[in-house]
Image (cartoon, rainbow, N blue to C red):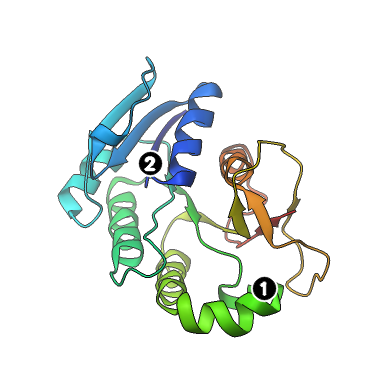
Amino acid sequence: MKIAIFGSTGSIGRELVEQALNKGCSVTAAARNPSKIDVKHKNLRVVGADVMDQQAVEAVVAQQDAILSALGTPALTRNTTRSQGTLHIIQAMEKFGVRRLISLSSLGIGDSRPNLPALYKYILVPILLRQGFAEHEIQESYVKQSNTDWTLVRPGAYTNGPLTGVYKQGFSVTDANIKAKISRADVADFMLKQLDTNDYVGKSPGVSY
């Protein structure tokens, strides 16, 4: 399978690239600063592409089988990279007829707000993470309105734990038993597994321990 990964130099993106190559995918890793990708593999193509540049995005998306987006910005950064970059990806996919989109979002977005622990719900999100969550909301709206076979992945807080392949997924927004955290490796594992199933097409599954 030929896949393109946007946000490939971020913490989730790096996991996606490594695990996708291990699964035998032909990977195009798109990065604004491609020199940050030090992985070498016969099935890896590294492309310099800023998601804010529509033409650059189109050059990456053309002739792919699926797109994985792990776009992100530092929590306190005020910009529209996540939302506008996602829109550019969607527009390119629709232009070239690429259907499958697996996009990283976050637990706490949309109807999953009740899944957040009290600290996040009442303090961190309203005060420190407000801008980032607002960007996620806009991003999700673009994805849901798109003419793609989309899945929005909503992980809990990231940890540096190992790849386990054992986690909760697609749980109810009222589930009080989740830990609201998950390793970056397991987030990437779940995202890549969506390439082989349609179970969550048109859905926004949470993923957490």
State which quadrant residue 113 falls in.
Answer: bottom right
Q: Is residue 10 left or right of residue 92?
A: right
The residue to which callout 1 is attached is 116
Q: Vertical placement of 173 versus 87: above or below?
A: below
- The number of numbered badges drawn on the structure is 2
Question: Closer to the camera, 11 or 31?
Answer: 11
The residue to which callout 2 is attached is 8
Q: Is residue 85 left or right of residue 136?
A: left
State which quadrant residue 81 falls in.
Answer: bottom left
Q: Which mark is residue 102?
A: none
| Residue type, label 2 | Ser
Tell me where residue 110 appears, x and y as whole percent: 57, 76
Tell me where residue 12 appears, x and y as whole percent: 49, 45
Tell me where residue 177 appears, x and y as whole percent: 83, 65
* Residue at x-position 25% and y-position 53%: 51
* Residue at x-position 56% and y-position 42%: 188
Question: Closer to the camera, 182 or 105?
Answer: 182
* Mark closer to the chain start, 2 or 1: 2
